[in-house]
Amino acid sequence: MKNQNFWMGFAVAAGLVVSSFVLKGALENFKDRDRIVSVKGLCERSVEADYVIWPLVYKEVGDDLPEIIENVSRKNNDVRTFLVQKGINADEISFSAPAVIDLEADRYRTEKAPYRYNVTSVITVASGKVGLVRQLMSQQSELMEKGIVLTQDDYQYQTIFSYNALNDIKPEMIEQATKNAREAALKFADDSGSKLGKIRTADQGTFSIMDRDNNTPYIKTVRVVTRVDYFLKD
């Protein structure tokens, strides 16, 4: 009977010792989890646009609609010839149907217009030859010699430069942003007299692509901000 009581007491004591160690570990772990530092890492890169949509817009006005449409057809062919001769592929050029405005049909107009019809023609170049298109944009005087004056100030028809090779630089940018975040966390841990622990959570962030400035829309700034939460240790 005494032996049985002895072993029962020993088992209880051993259980208490094990429980104390488990509880101590749990408390320390809980303490560590309460000590967290959240940091952000930024990575930016300037890249050149790799695709462009360039609308070439001009207007024809007059009173004889068939004559205007004939002039538009001829000028469209002149624009097409100009672009192809300069190196733009034929399948990169598209033509929209002429937009015709009959000014006499405008019941709100109080003054008689000097002409009846205002016709807008839009030829669109969609190409990956960004450098070539930029050169052609500065050579529009050759079209003016053929009587084709392109509209420059119509907000509806803006040249759009885009960057489509984001997947090629994503891994390196995420790696750099994460590295910057870790450096910030290490600095914080050092300043607070702590050591940096494992990652608690991480978010790679969202990529954004913006024009670098208003004057060079063909140069883009790619930006990503990652957020990482680290445990801190004594």
Image (cartoon, rainbow, N blue to C red):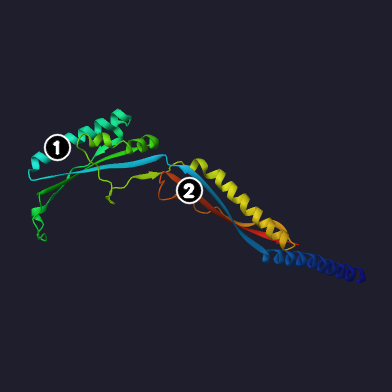
> Quick one: label 1, few (<14), some, or many (20+) residues within 10 Å?
few
Residue 36 position, x and y percent, is 66, 63
The residue type indicated by label 2 comes to: Thr
User: Which residue is the site of mark 2?
Assistant: 221
Q: Which residue is mark 1?
A: 71
Looking at marks 1 and 2 on the same chain, the residue that comes earlier in the sequence is marked by 1
The answer to whether mark 1 and mark 2 are in CB contact below 8 A is no
Q: Give the CA distance from mark 1 to mark 2.
A: 42 Å
Q: How many marks?
A: 2
Q: Residue at x 19, y 35 (%)?
A: 75
Q: Position of residue 222 (x, y in %)?
A: 49, 48
Q: Answer above or below: position of 77 versus 100.
A: above
Q: Is residue 14 left or right of residue 123?
A: right
Which of the two marks, 1 or 2, is nearer to us in this view? 1
Taking the image as shown, residue 231 lies to the left or right of residue 227, namely right
User: In the rendered structure, which amino acid carries the disc numbered 1?
Assistant: Asn
Residue 17: name its quadrant: bottom right
Quarter in which the N terminus is drawn? bottom right
- Where residue 210 appears, as percent x and y from the top left, is 44, 50
Q: Is residue 31 left or right of residue 13?
A: left
Element at label 1: helix
- Mark 2 is surrounded, within 10 Å at the Cα level, by few (under 14), some (14 to 19) or many (20 or more) other residues, namely some
- Of 218 and 177, the residue lying toward us: 218
Specify the label residue 121 is tagged with: none
